[in-house]
Amino acid sequence: MTGAKKWAPLVLFILLGSALTYGLAKPESSTIKSKMIGLSVPSFTLPAAIPGRPGLSSADLATGQPHLVNVFGSWCVPCMAEAPQLKQIADAGVPIVGIAVRDKPENLQRFLGRYGNPFRAIGADDSSQVMMALGSSGVPESFVVDGQGRILQQQIGPINPEDVTGIVAAVKGAR
Amino acid sequence: MKRLLLAFALVAAPALADSDLPPAPLANTQLPDPEQEAKAKALMETIRCLVCQGQSIADSDAELAGDMRAMVRERIAAGEKPEAIRAWLVQRYGSWVSYEPPFDRVTWLLWAAPVLFVVIGVLIAHSSFRRRRA
């Protein structure tokens, strides 16, 4: 047997071993990015989640004006943490609409009373169907949608103070 | 103090708390038609839960898994094909969401590996038998 042939199995074994060890040691990412980015918001109609604010439909997102769509719930702790940032974004002139996932009107009222209501419209998504249609896998998530109803950008998890400028720019830069 | 409390709440509360709403009607109720239920069950066993990743939506107790089961049952009851529902989910979450990997650029080796290994085995066996005879 020649030298190369003799060592080939060992080399192969080490290569395979390192590849498998790397695969095991590498922490698996648990965020699931929506594949709907770049596509139109799927058609949906949601009833109003609280009295006094209209519900939300996909048609409302294709009126020529870009929006920030916030998927949230009054029962979700990180949603409380992102409330001040949403207020800042709304104050900067960005229209924000909400999709309230699995929420009760009275809980939602209390939540909005306590943390502020930056939403122009809030649709009630009682069985997460619109959340799934958007390719969202939890709350809070936010989508930048352009005036034609196309999804441009997804924010997974709460909007942190350092994300505000980028999101305002993204919505303002959209058509 | 308020900030500190919020910080504690963020650490203490589970990342995905549960809402107050009861599970969707079809989340834990079988369809009346056993044939449709069997189809729905088979599909649910091969769709990955988005929250407890690693469990199928048939096995998971997460609220979102319940909503996904309800969605599957509603669509099956409305006459939609299981593969169309899977495609709908894959379009949104990628093939990650399905436990049946498709045959594509990334996964061909996964499917081809068994055949490849048999071929390699036959070649090794062939050469070693020949050596012994010689």
Image: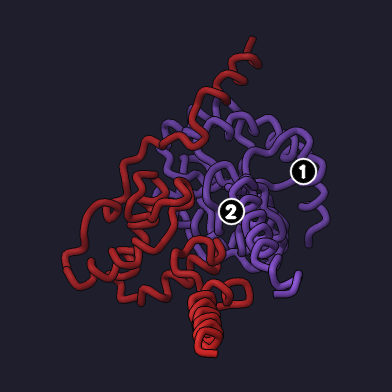
**Chain letter for the red colouring in the rendering:** B
Q: Position of residue A39 (x, y in %)?
A: 65, 68
Q: Which mark is residue A32?
A: 2
Q: Is residue B74 above or below residue B21?
A: below
Q: Nearer the viewer, residue A157 or B58?
A: B58
Position of the N terminus of chain A, as image quadrant, is bottom right
Q: Give the residue at x 69% y 68%.
A: A6
Q: Position of residue A122 (x, y in %)?
A: 54, 46
**Chain name for mark 1:** A
Q: Give the residue at x 56% y 65%.
A: B94
What residue sits right under mark 1 in the picture? Answer: A93
Q: Give the residue at x 37% y 60%.
A: B71
Q: Nearer the viewer, residue A52 or A18?
A: A18
Q: How is the image coloured?
A: by chain
Q: Report crowding for label 1: few under 14, some 14 to 19, many 20 or more residues within 10 A (C-alpha).
A: few
Which residue is most to the top?
Answer: B1
**Chain name for mark 2:** A
Q: Is residue B48 left or right of residue B73?
A: right
Mark 1: secondary structure: loop
Q: Give the residue at x 42% y 75%.
A: B84
Which residue is most to the front?
Answer: B134
Q: Which mark is residue A101?
A: none
Mark 2: secondary structure: loop
